Amino acid sequence: METVTVIREMRENQIIPATRNTLRYVPLLLDKKPTAGKNIIKNPQILERKVTGCIVTRMTITTAPVLLLLATGEIEVEGHRPQTRGIYYHELITLDTSLYYFGIETKNETHIREYLNLIIESFELRGERGSAIYMKIDVSGRTETTREKNSENIEVLEEIKSERYFFVRGNEISVNGEVIEDTAGFKLEGKLLHETVKTHTFSIRRKETDKVDFSFMRSEITAELTFTNPEEYETGYKASFKISLERLVYEGEESYPDASGVWGRNFRYRVYGSLKVRVYTNTEEL
């Protein structure tokens, strides 16, 4: 068994139940010309080492706020939600010039590894109708330390609390203020370019039908994604997060069947406006 913990400066660390972890510390080699007549490079020089890889996890009431903050990087506004005992809201925004550095610690039965001074190179938030919502983060960095567990350094694997996942019911996305009832899936991606500029793309998959006019999907749109967790913090109040996207410019579409053979139409956009996130949780500070 392995656990993954996100380490953040001046903030509480957060254990996440990763479904996939490919983090590794790899050497960057100096290219040398091979020996004449041979394709083998003898004694290549290691310039430095680099942390690379990804973590994939399902979005829960605990992991969603942390991962969404890592993907955006800035808290714009936060406070207590009125008429509740312990629900807080956090408004997150992406700034092109911001880089959020963090660390990741992985533990198994024998070793502890720390990857520090990491940044997110890209992220992918995706979901399909009737399934859990997943977040994938691709990271890079320069520092890794490994130590063995022993009698002087006894650390137990933290138990990951069992929580309900956020999942896609099919009516959580609205386009130009109109709820898309036939949503079959979605994907929001962000990439870091030149170490400072983030670019975002968005796609929504709708069920293929002759009864719906898709023409308004082929222009510049705005979109909102609102997901609510089944678990209640207090009677009538549940954890949720909303993503608002402005100026989505249409880039194309494809029609193809899913794994079950159901045909759908996938619309693709590039985000030229703002990306804002509002998270409702019982955590006062993210």
Image (cartoon, helix red, strand yellow):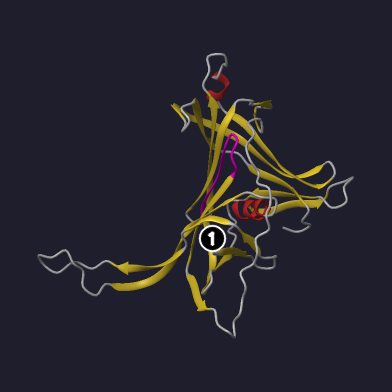
Give the image quarter of residue 187: top right
Residue 91, given in percent of the width and then of the height, sits at: 72, 48
Q: Is residue 24 left or right of residue 166?
A: left
**Amino acid at the residue labelled 1:** Ile
The tally of labels here is 1
For the point 60% across and 43% down, the residue is 132
If the image is split into quadrants, where does the N terminus sit? bottom right
* Vertical position of residue 236 compared to residue 2: above or below: above
- Along the viewing direction, whichever of 266 and 277 lies nearer the viewer: 266
Residue occupying the far top of the picture? 211
Magenta segment main secondary structure = strand
For the point 27% across and 66% down, the residue is 31
Residue 223, given in percent of the width and then of the height, sits at: 63, 33
CA neighbours of label 1 inside 10 A, class few (<14), some (14 to 19), many (20+):
many
Per the rendered image, the range of residues in magenta is 121-133
For the point 60% across and 39% down, the residue is 273
Q: Which residue is mark 1?
A: 119
* Vertical position of residue 91 compared to residue 176: above or below: below
For the point 54% across and 19% down, the residue is 215
Residue occupying the far right of the picture? 83
Residue 253, given in percent of the width and then of the height, sits at: 46, 27
Residue 97, given in percent of the width and then of the height, sits at: 58, 55
If the image is split into quadrants, where does the C terminus sit? bottom right
Is residue 131 covered in magenta? yes
Q: Is residue 83 left or right of residue 6?
A: right
Give the image quarter of residue 29: bottom left
Is residue 205 covered in magenta? no
Q: Is residue 259 left or right of residue 18?
A: left
- Along the viewing direction, whichever of 57 and 252 lies nearer the viewer: 57
Give the image quarter of residue 227: top right
